[in-house]
Image (cartoon, rainbow, N blue to C red):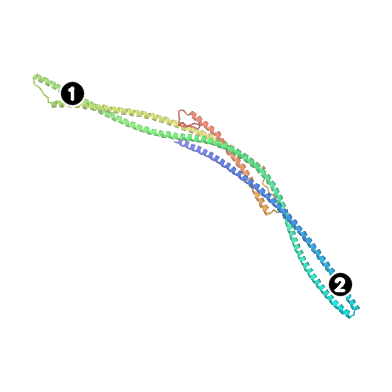
Amino acid sequence: MGKDGSWKVDLETAREKYMAEIADLDKAKQELRKIRQDCNTFMEEKTGAIEQAAEAERTAKANMERASELSKEIAAVHESVDQLKLACVQEQEEEAKIYAEKNVQKQSYKAKLEESAEKLLALKKETDADLAKSLEAQLAETMSEIEALRKEMDSAKSSDLDTVKVVTAELDDAKDSLLKVAEEESTLQTLVETLKLDLENVKKEHSDLKEKEAETESLAGGLHVKLRKAKSELEVAVAEEAKARGASEEMISTLHQLTLETENAKLEAEEMKMQAEDLKKEAEATRMALEEAEKKLKVAMEEAEEAKSAEAEARDQIKILSEKTTAARSSTSEAGARITLSRDEFDSLSRKVEELDNLAEIRVGAAMAQVEAVKASEYEALKKLEATQKEIDYIKTATQEALKKAEMAEAAKKAVEGELRRWREREQKKAAEAASRILAETHMNYRSSPQSYTVQKEKPSEKFMESHLKMHSPIETKKQNTQENIMETHKLQKAKTSVSKKKVLMPSISGIFHKKKNQVEGNSPSYLPGEKPVW
């Protein structure tokens, strides 16, 4: 029972190891799925980066168009300022002309007044009173004309002053608008300079993005090649794993069949032992029945002897009676007398003799039948004992063969476990070396790969700053994802190597089982890996 328990524990350990290998394979498949997801994420990020670069180009074009529009607006403002300046100059020239004309008119009016005054004095001197009256009338008329001219001059002055005020106000407004336009022009020039700087930075970042994109495309191409290679190797590993799983399942089924056969052999041995005990009990009962039959036979023989003796005694009595009767007859014949027996007495004597004969025959027949029955039961009991002894010998032989097979299965299982342990040690050593080599290569690749970059800008606009942050962040994420993809690919290659080694292990296991199989003598219901059960 201890060997069976340890064998079951070892079988469970082998199953657990097999399930652990299956779990490792599933883990490798999950890592491959993760690599595929990372690759898809990388492609999506690459597409996003391309879209962001296109958006940056569109933004740069829009900024250039805006700058050209602002330049056109500035040129239009300059033209309007020039026109306003020309208008101001024209207004000033017209105002100067108006002032000059007014001065000429004033001078002409003064000259006319002086001339009129002189004429009046001359007329006063030259003419008489009548003439003086007429002259006074003319003077009054002239004075009224002068007054009218003065009023016209005053009204012209007032209208000229209003015009000058309006022109002055317009000039002030034009100056204010010119100042505003100048301020807006300086602001626009500053904005244009900022946009130029942003455009230069965008161009520089765009060129850097193109370089990064070329690098990422090369990395993506390498990852795609590795992914295709990993897919092909994974397919080969899956096929080999299916073969290994079939062989392992066959081995497990064989071990399970051996276990069942061992259990069945044990159960059959127990059952045979119970049957042997029952047969022993039956043999004991048969022996007791034989002894009892022998006793009955002895009693029957004694009764038969008694019957024979009684029969002999009866015959002796009959003989004696016959002799007596003969003697009596002879004596009576000699004496002339006659002895007579009654018919009833003679019949009774005859019946007694017949009854005694029949009783003796019946007792002898019963005794002989009982003896025959006892002999037959004894013969059957002997046959049962012989059959039981043969079955016990067969059970012992089958039990020994089952124990021998169990020991062989135990030895084969230990050999398989030793081979698995040595293979695992070799695989762990190779995996550690491969992991250290991959880490070293990854570290060197990480050092040799271009690092993340930043672009210094002077006074960037908020819109361009947001677009720059949106474009810059996925590049860093893309680089991290690329390094993670490289590590996952190396992990997948290591898992693939671990799975591919199973193919090398299974033939050695099958060879071990075949060697153990060749050592077994005689027919066996067990089936080792590679054998086909015959039903």
The residue carrying mark 2 is 112
Answer whether residue 156 is visible to the viewer in this image: yes
Dot placed on the residue nearer the N-terminal end, 2 or 1: 2
Dividing the picture into quarters, in which one does residue 379 lie? top left
For the N terminus, give its image quadrant.
Answer: top left
Q: Secondary structure at mark 1?
A: helix
Front-most of 368 and 201? 201
Inter-mark Cα distance, 2 to 1: 230 Å
Residue farthest right in this picture: 126
Q: Secondary structure at mark 2?
A: helix
Name the residue rendered at 78%, 62% in the picture.
87
For residue 173, above or below residue 487: below
Q: Give percent across and percent down for residue 496.
A: 58, 38
The residue carrying mark 1 is 316
Answer whether residue 458 is visible to the viewer in this image: no
Name the residue rendered at 81%, 64% in the picture.
94
Using residue 27 as the reference point, say whether residue 123 is left or right of it: right
Q: Give percent across and percent down for residue 266.
A: 42, 34
For residue 184, above or below residue 37: below
Residue farthest top in this picture: 334
For the C terminus, give its image quadrant.
Answer: top left
Q: Give percent across and percent down for residue 315.
A: 18, 23
Name the residue rendered at 39%, 34% in the picture.
271
Using residue 69 as the reference point, say whether residue 310 is left or right of it: left
Dividing the picture into quarters, in which one does residue 81 lie? bottom right
Residue farthest left in this picture: 336
Front-most of 61 and 321? 61
- Residue type at the position of mark 2: Lys
Q: Give percent across and percent down for residue 259.
A: 46, 35
Dividing the picture into quarters, in which one does residue 77 lie? bottom right
